[in-house]
């Protein structure tokens, strides 16, 4: 594989580890834990993995272990740093015994079920250290939830002598990891399952998990691009740029980019829901900002839009909930696409039908059609940025007719998501991911299963980071998925009383009116620590 000069230099970077992981460790166990909600139901569903203690590693003596093999799976959307989780795990496993082997299952959880795998050799590993992407073994969105899949999995795990499986994924994939851990524990199959918190969306976080990996690099990449657009915007002074940002339901990415770039407007879906705003309220809010800036001669600006916005407009949320139930029925599942739309139209309530019919056809179609394997609406396919700018144009035209000055309204549209998912990991993600992987090897060595690898205190220098494990059941509650109540990891949405949102809310009126843009520039890998090693603004504000 031919490499760029940056890739060659970056390959030599040795990621930092928490001090506790630099030598042999012992596991210090805390008190028994409880799930965040629905304790009785979760306990009944996970009798073998419920209530386990939180673990923190300390320097100590490592028990002698027979050689063992480990399997790894990358699950779901790509996130910068995945290769470093693998290299951390690889180095950790080899440090315990050089004869230990690491196997990667190809193209996600489906690789385990279909017995598609490869050994990760030292040469192969060296090709991918500190690089972005998941291409070393590929990723996929197959949902691991059927006994038949677990049984096919155990066949290949036994064949390869695999003692533990590490699943790198978001909330849904880690939920599946926990279900698998419980199943193997109940059957006494002797295979441990460990999860690792991944997703650019930043919504896999809680009291124990500070952030999911990839969020840092993805946000810095989008912020570079938004900064570049803002500079262009402030140079030409003739366009309003509508920028949609990935992040699925949660608005963490949009909020972090707003904190980094100070755009004129950033919508936060969670706030739209809390304030019970309609689509028209959102449009009016943007149009007002456009008119205020126009009055000052500024016919340009930037609007950041979280990709899940549509789902959070209360009337549309209600509609989606009913569509989900209808689409999950066997009757609907057996229909073709166009028949499905007619079917839902005749089965939804009158109130929801009105909302459905009021939406532009393309949005209505998207809401009524495909779900991903976990039952989520595929929000990345809805062009909210175009929908909003078109509706703002109509509103401004209407105000103009009423005699209000609205200036000129030229627009450009962007959607940033894939641009950041495979970026070369920032120093933060390179170190964080390597530590998560290395730490997973210590959880395995200590016989743990049903745990998520966790590294905390990450706003401090890496040496002071805290390494350990959290039982996955601790993060669970019951939620409706594909029409049924299921145990799932609770998704972390933007908290409106949290420090990052409060800081943003205290500044946004000034940013809306003035041109207060910040241009963050590209991620730097070498140089002063205040330029190269800073975590996200979200994390910094949360830890203040
Ligand atoms: P994960 O939750 O699997 O990490 O995926 C994140 C994400 O990038 C979302 O932000 C986005 O909505 C989705 O994946 C798009 O996925 P796909 O490319 O498979 O359609």
Image: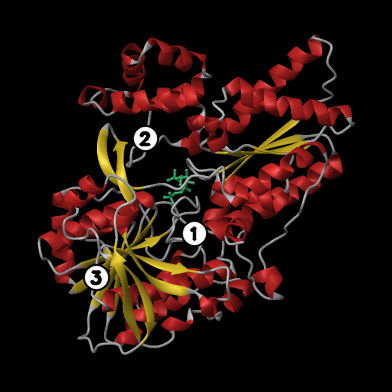
Say which mark, if any, is on residue 211: 1
The relative height of residue 15 versus residue 250 in the rendered view (above or below) is below
* Distance from the alpha carbon under mark 3 to that under mark 2: 31 Å
Q: Residues within 10 Å of mark 2 (few under 14, many from 20)?
A: some
The percent position of residue 401, horizontal first and vertical second, equals: 80, 10
The percent position of residue 290, horizontal first and vertical second, equals: 77, 29
Task: Tell me which residue sits at (50%, 32%) in the image.
Answer: 312
Mark 3 touches mark 2? (CB < 8 Å): no
Task: Tell me which residue sits at (57%, 57%) in the image.
Answer: 542
Say which mark, if any, is on residue 164: 3
* Distance from the alpha carbon under mark 3 to that under mark 1: 24 Å
The relative height of residue 297 versus residue 456 in the rendered view (above or below) is above
The mark nearer the N terminus, 3 or 2, is 3
* Distance from the alpha carbon under mark 1 to that under mark 2: 26 Å
Q: Find the residue positioned furthest to the front.
A: 31
Image quarter in which the C terminus is found = bottom right
Residue at the disc numbered 2: 371
């Amino acid at each position: 594989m031919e490499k760029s000069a940056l890739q060659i230099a970056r390959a030599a970077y040795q990621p930092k580890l928490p001090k506790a992981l630099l030598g042999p460790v012992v596991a210090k166990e805390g008190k028994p834990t409880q799930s965040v909600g629905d304790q009785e139901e979760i306990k009944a569903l996970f009798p073998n993995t419920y209530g386990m203690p939180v673990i923190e590693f300390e320097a100590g003596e490592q028990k002698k272990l027979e050689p063992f093999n480990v399997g790894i799976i990358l699950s779901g959307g790509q996130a910068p740093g995945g290769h470093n989780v693998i290299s951390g795990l690889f180095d950790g496993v080899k440090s315990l015994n050089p004869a230990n082997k690491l196997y990667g299952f190809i193209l996600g959880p489906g690789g385990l079920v279909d017995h598609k795998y490869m050994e990760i050799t030292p040469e192969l590993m060296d090709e991918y250290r500190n690089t972005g992407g998941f291409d070393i073994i590929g990723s996929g969105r197959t949902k691991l939830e059927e006994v038949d899949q677990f049984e096919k999995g155990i066949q290949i795990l036994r064949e390869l002598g695999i003692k533990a499986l590490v699943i790198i994924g978001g909330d849904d994939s880690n939920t599946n990891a926990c279900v698998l851990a419980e199943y193997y524990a109940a059957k006494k199959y002797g295979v441990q399952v460990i999860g690792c918190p991944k997703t650019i969306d930043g919504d896999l976080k809680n009291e124990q998990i500070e952030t999911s990996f990839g969020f840092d690099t993805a946000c810095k990449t989008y912020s570079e691009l938004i900064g570049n657009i803002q500079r262009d915007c402030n140079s030409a002074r003739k366009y309003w740029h509508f920028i949609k940002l990935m992040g699925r339901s949660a608005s963490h990415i949009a909020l972090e980019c707003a904190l980094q770039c100070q755009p004129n407007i950033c919508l936060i879906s969670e706030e739209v829901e809390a304030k019970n705003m309609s689509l028209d309220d959102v449009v009016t809010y943007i149009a007002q900002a456009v008119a205020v800036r126009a009055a000052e001669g500024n016919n340009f600006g930037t609007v950041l839009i979280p990709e899940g916005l549509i789902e959070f407009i209360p009337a549309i949320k209600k509609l989606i909930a009913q569509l989900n139930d209808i689409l999950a029925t066997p009757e609907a599942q057996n229909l073709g696409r166009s028949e499905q739309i007619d079917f839902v139209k005749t089965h939804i309530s009158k109130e929801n039908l009105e909302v459905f019919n009021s939406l532009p056809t393309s949005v209505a179609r998207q809401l009524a059609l495909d779900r991903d394997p976990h039952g989520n609406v595929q929000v990345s396919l809805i062009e909210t940025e175009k929908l909003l700018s078109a509706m703002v144009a109509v509103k401004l035209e209407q105000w103009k007719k009423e005699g209000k000055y609205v200036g000129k309204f030229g627009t450009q549209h962007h959607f940033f998501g894939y641009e950041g998912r495979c970026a070369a990991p920032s120093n933060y993600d390179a170190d964080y991911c390597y530590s998560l992987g290395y730490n997973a090897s210590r959880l395995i060595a200590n016989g743990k299963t049903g745990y998520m690898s966790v590294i905390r205190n990450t706003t401090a220098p890496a040496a002071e980071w805290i390494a350990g494990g959290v039982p996955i059941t601790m993060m669970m509650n019951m939620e409706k998925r594909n029409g049924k109540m299921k145990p799932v990891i609770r998704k972390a949405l933007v908290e409106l009383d949290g420090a990052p949102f409060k800081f943003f809310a205290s500044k946004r009126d000034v940013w809306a009116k003035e041109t207060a843009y910040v241009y963050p520039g590209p991620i730097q890998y070498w140089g002063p620590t205040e330029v190269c090693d800073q975590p996200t603004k979200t994390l910094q504000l949360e830890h203040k």
